[in-house]
Amino acid sequence: MELKKRVGQKIKELRIMSGLNQTEYAKIFGKKRGTLADIEAGRCNVGINVVVEIALHHNVTTDEILMR
């Protein structure tokens, strides 16, 4: 699986574990729901700043998001 899809899947898992829908989750990170949907589906790249924000929000390392 390519990196964009793996990262998107991990972000989706973290969102679901937090109990938020895409709109609520996207708002936390200053993104639109459609952008988050594209990230989760691996259709677009996610910026490193967003990866860091998500990691901090969930108290995980960026490696946990970026690696398998």
Image (spheres, rainbow, N blue to C red):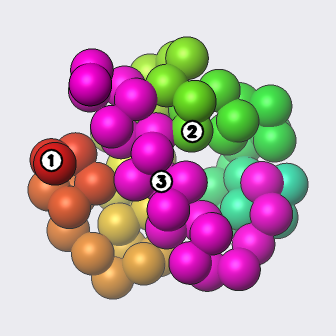
Residue appearing at x 15%, y 47% in the figure: 67
Q: Amino acid at mark 1?
A: Met
**Label placed on residue 11:** 3
Q: CA distance from mark 1 to mark 3?
A: 12 Å
Residue 35 is labelled as none
**Left or right: 13 with respect to 20?**
left
- Quadrant containing the N terminus is top left
Q: Is residue 36 left or right of residue 64?
A: right
The boundaries of the magenta stretch are 1-22
Q: In x, y percent, where is residue 63?
A: 14, 56
Q: Secondary structure at mark 2?
A: helix
Mark 2 → mark 1, Cα distance in angstroms: 15 Å
Give me the residue at 33% from left, 37% from top. Answer: 6
**Which residue is drawn at the image coordinates 47% and 53% (left, top)?**
11
* Disc nearer the start of the sequence (1/3): 3
Of 54 and 18, the residue lying toward us: 18
| Other residues around mark 1 within 10 Å, as few (<14) / some (14–19) / many (≥20) | few
- The circle drawn on residue 40 is 2
Residue 67: mark in rendering: 1
Q: Are marks 3 and 2 in contact (CB under 8 Å)?
A: yes
* Residue toward you, 67 or 31: 67
- Label 1 close to label 3 by CB (< 8 Å): no
SS of the residue at dot 1?
A: loop
State the predominant SS element of the stretch in magenta.
helix
